Amino acid sequence: MRYTWSCMGHQIAMRGISKAYGSTVANQDVSFDLAPGEIHALLGENGAGKTTLMNILFGMVRADAGEIHIDGQKVDLDGPQDALDQGIGMVHQHFMLVQGFTVAENVVLGTEAAWNLRLSHKEVENRVAESARRLRFEIDPHRRVSDLPIDTQQRVEIFKLLYRGADVLILDEPTSSLGPAQVDDLFATLKALRDDGRSIVVVTHKLNEVMEIADRVTMLRNGKNVATAEKGSYDEQALARMMTGSEVHEVTVTGTESSGRESIYRVQDLVVHRGERLHAVHGVSFDVRPGEIVGISGVEGNGQRELVDALAGVAEVESGTVALDGQDITAASALDLRRRGVSAIPEDRQSWGLVLDMSVADNLALSDVPAGRFSRRGFLRPKAVKRSARRLLEEYDVRPADAGLLVLALSGGNQQKVVIAREMSREHRVLIAANPTQGVDVGATEYVHQRLLEDRSEGKAVVLVSIDLDELLKLADRIIVLFRGKIAYQAARNECTVDDIALAMAGTPGRGAEITEEEAAEPAAAAEAT
Amino acid sequence: MTAGQPAALPPRSRLEERLRSLTLPRGITLWSILRVLAAAAATLLIFAILLQLLGSDFGTAFNAVTDSAFGNSFNFGQTLMMASILMCTGLAAAIPFRAQLWNVGGEGQMWFGAFVTIGIALNLPKGWPTALTIAVIVIGAMVAGAVWGLIPGIMKATVNANEVITSLMMTFIAIELGTWAIDGIWPQGASNETESVPVLMPNIWEGTLVTWGLPLAVIAVVVGWAIMNRTKLGFEIKAVGLNNRAAEMNGMSTAKVAIVTFALGGAFAGLAGSIFILGINSALPAGFQLNNFGYLGIAVALVARLNPVWIIPSAILFAGLRVGSDGLQASTGLSTTVGQILIGLFVILLLAFRLIRFSYPEAAR
């Protein structure tokens, strides 16, 4: 045996699981099976009940009805610790790591080693390093989690569970913030873990991921089972049809709306710092014409977030300019930018886009209220807020269309629709959209794409930051790749190749690159260059 | 990502969750009222044990407390007047707290309000109509409180100075200023307090000492409610308190909210100061500090879950305990410090009963 602890996955059977949150039914008589040594994809749109089902298996949520059997034995999971005792571990979409702690501290947190006063810090780190080596996990136990890139943090999460003896791993939307190369790494890791006999559930809404990694797929729709199928018995189109219950119509960009028009939005030599991070924005320039979508991509942590924050008026610009119609708007506040017609869909809707504990109506009015709409002499007009909300809910197909509900209670896709309704219903000339389809189901993704293209045909200037290459190739007129805060590649869509883009994302400057080979190779050089 | 499940929330530490659930209004539910009652019962139990140890009879003590707080209209009037003060200092805490700004300086803002009340009252020309005189003084006191609150607010907004520390330090300064008023600026001579003000709020309930101070405080609560629930400003205060990043992203200014909420809170505390001088005591006494009206306002606000309307019953509850503990001394001979212990116990137990959560999803909410 290669490892000191058992790595035999379990036979898990969930039967007749039902769960409701108030009037919202999350799971209704759902069944799910997991065999040892398989990767089982749990597929469904946002709000289909996938996460709820897995939270029930992880003991975090109690089912209203139904049974869970592990290796034929009926179990009652009351809390995550019970699940962990049974060898079941879960990696949430939002990681549960203590940012200020080291990797080793996070791994042992809550285990006996964290309490044993006789163990020195060094011994704990050695133990963690030892088991990491045995599992062929490349992680450095001494590093602080907050210093690690997102994919490494995810690796720490997975390792943490293995360290606690989990043989059944549940990963909730594990690829939602990873670039293509990182996804490949993750999948390789998962396959290796499966080959060692562990069972893995991957919760996802991405069809290509199911095709690539799953041995079996179970699909949910509206909280109910749709189908369970073995690898080889389905293809992507079949899955898409089953998942949405309808044919998905691919949108493709036709013609160039922007040809021959003067650019209205101009970013010049923009430099943005964030804390002591090296990879902020180090002199990026581009311009956007009306009716043009400029796509910006890159592996997370290469300056896209800081760029978006600066363009949206919430991060300070060190130097360089942003101009709209020749007017300098570099120093404009978020409020000012909106008045001038710059709308922004922030990347992390839960942190930046929405106030989760406020109602849907209030969230739809979130930026209009400070701008003076919906109030008269300082007094709010709640009826006007409600009325406008009801109209937007219908127009943007938010479900449930209940303006009084807390945004917290909506599914991810519907939360995103609230943000989109707010930002796109306002008069605007420029739209900054940061990963607008991240963590959003197929139907909603299609919807967002349609809206972006509408903006394009209405002659708006759109900056689309996305980690999803397919999305960019489908929508963008021009694609820019950032690496270490500089442009590593830029080309019109019809001149782009996936290989070149992938190379640029990985740090090989391509067409139109403004970053030099040396800067790309030496992070320090790029930092000092500013 | 299904409706209402905890995993859809961004990760927050347990402590943060507890702070949120403690400070953010989720409405007053039957459950929360039950918890307040449970805390009261536990307080009484511990208090009974304490009295046994001190050799006093619990029954007598309990009757003394309830009788002197609510026993007859005169006593109840005393409770109401003290509640008026606590309603104002409660608002002084509640409004900044809604924006997640911890104004613990209500005490100092109230002191400065009282200081300015005396200053204006002693120097206004005689012969003005009473209503006009009182209006001028009250507005002056509210402006004074607002100025005292503005200093920590502006420091928070500009250099991100910790508002807990700055508002507390401002309190120390205000108390010294009040002490100076008693000893040096407007000494009365014989007794250890300032000169009495020449104008007082008229009485509104015969047979009691209830004055205009009570309706003024109730109006203040209504204004506080309207600001939070019916104005653009209230909307921004709530949004900033619940998610300051999203608020900024959507064009709100957290700096503006910090300055405005501190000024508003200070104004309400200043009002408390003027109600005390014009409506209750006519002078600033040397022992004023022992009342801790400003600090008690924080407890009043927390029990009301920062909801202005619930500040009224919450203030009456605390005022009853406070007045009752004075009666305790009168009828049983126990020191007033025993009464202070009663209030302290109650606050601690309230915190304990609010902090307990029974399942994970509830804790995550």
Image (cartoon, coloured by chain):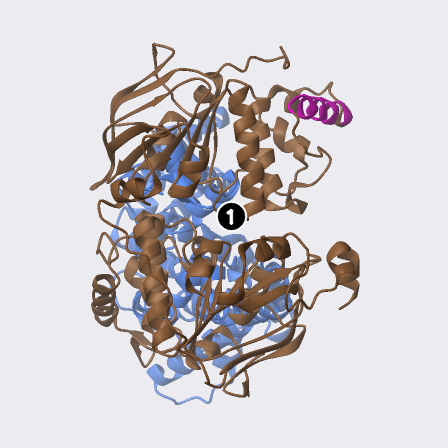
Chain colours: A brown, B blue
Position of residue A14 measured from the top left corner of the image (x, y, whole percent): 31, 21
- The answer to whether residue B84 is left or right of residue A488 is left
Is residue A261 depicted above or below A23 in this figure? below
Query: Looking at the image, which is closer to me, A133 or A497?
Result: A497
User: The N terminus of chain B is located in which quarter?
Assistant: top left
Q: Position of residue A357 (x, y in %)?
A: 37, 53
- Whether residue A334 is situated above or below residue B176 in the rendered picture: below
Residue A131 within the magenta-colored segment of the rendering: yes
In the drawing, does residue B14 fall left or right of residue B166?
Answer: left
- The quarter holding residue A384 reads bottom left
Query: From the image, which quarter does the C terminus of chain B lie in?
Result: top left
Q: Residue at x 50, y 14 (%)?
A: A8
Q: Report the chain holding disc 1.
A: A
Secondary structure type for disc 1: loop
Give the prevailing secondary structure in the magenta stretch: helix
Q: Which residue is mark 1?
A: A177
Residue B132 falls in which quadrant of the image?
A: bottom left
**At 71% from the left edge and 65% from the top edge, which residue is drawn?**
A515
Q: Nearer the viewer, residue A121 or A159?
A: A159
Residue A146 visible? The answer is yes
Decide: is A325 above or below A517: below
Amino acid carrying label 1: it is: Ser
**Front position in the image: A33 or A415:** A33
Q: Residue shown at 60%/23% (left/top)?
A: A163
Which segment is the magenta one?
Answer: A122-135
Q: Residues within 10 Å of mark 1 (few under 14, many from 20)?
A: many
